[in-house]
Amino acid sequence: MSTTRIEWTRGDDGTPGVVWNPTTGCDKVSPGCGLPRWDGDDTGGCYALAMAKRLKAMGQTKYQHDGDPRTSGPGFGLTVHEDALTIPLRWQKPRRVFVNSMSDLFHARVPREFVARVWAVMAATPQHTYQVLTKRPQRMARIIQDNPQNLLELLDNEVTTRILYAAPWPLPNVWLGTSVEDQKRADERIPALLNTPAAVRWLSCEPLLGHVDLQAHLYPTPCSAGCGCRLPDDPDRRECGCDSDCTMHPDWP
């Protein structure tokens, strides 16, 4: 088990969250994946990419697959870890779990069948709260859709299929989120997130690279009572932060 200092993974009682990485590695898809650094460092500001490079040098077995140097780097090639799938089953005490802190579960090269198995593990461990964050919410929406049947059809194991079939839908212990670093990505990703069934939807506005207006996405229809209340399709949580190599303006977002 690996704890994390990321603030938004803490439990309501302040207990540090943990990370679970059934896949590792990724590829840059937008400016939020990292800005070019002044010193020419090829990690480009992505903490996971930089960490993978160090872990590869340390001989960590999960980080020996290199990615495309144009979009990834040493030790950061997308890799599926079958042996990591069952780790949460061993945790008895409830935990808040950041899923894939070192990857993106909805990367194009993560098999849909594997995503379904991840969902089955989360269904089998309702004592934990899982935070899934992606920069690819369009693929997430296509896979999850509006009922579990799409996932059930991807499972070839009777036990995992039965677990997912018996679970409430959407899974009440799974939070689905997307990263929003600028207005373009907000306009592209938030609609896909809102079209994905989830007990909790959330936004990670970090690294925030400029002003982002969320109004049109969070409150598309004015409240008829004029009270400013939250509408049903308003994401439940928003986390804001700055890239390590920039300064965030206090008026953002």
Image (cartoon, rainbow, N blue to C red):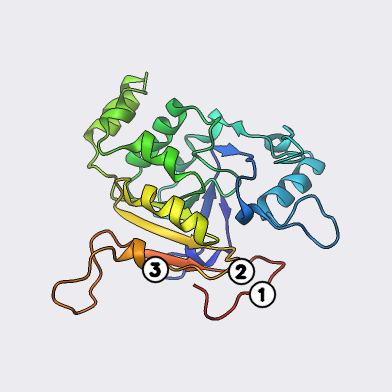
**Residue at 31% from the left image edge and 49% from the top image edge:** 198
Eye-nearest disc, 3 or 2: 2
Q: 42 or 171, which lies in front?
A: 42
Mark positioned earlier in the residue sequence (3 or 2): 3
Q: Is residue 236 visible?
A: no
- Mark 2, other Cα within 10 Å: few <14 / some 14–19 / many ≥20: some
**Residue at 74% from the left image edge and 54% from the top image edge:** 44
**Residue at 74% from the left image edge and 51% from the top image edge:** 50
Q: Is residue 180 visible?
A: yes
Mark positioned earlier in the residue sequence (3 or 1): 3
Q: Are marks 1 and 2 in contact (CB under 8 Å)?
A: yes
Mark positioned earlier in the residue sequence (1 or 2): 2
Marks 3 and 2, how far apart at CA: 23 Å
Q: 12 or 53, which lies in front?
A: 53
Q: Are marks 3 and 2 in contact (CB under 8 Å)?
A: no
Q: Amino acid at mark 1?
A: Thr
**Residue at 51% from the left image edge and 56% from the top image edge:** 184
Q: Based on the displayed image, in which of its 4 quarters is residue 152 positioned?
A: top left
Q: Amino acid at mark 3?
A: Asp
> In the drawing, does residue 204 fall left or right of residue 170?
right
- Circle 3 sits on which residue? 12
- Mark 3, other Cα within 10 Å: few <14 / some 14–19 / many ≥20: few
Marks 1 and 2, how far apart at CA: 7 Å
Q: Amino acid at mark 2?
A: Cys
The image position of residue 9, as x and y in percent, is 48, 61
- Badge number at residue 242: 2
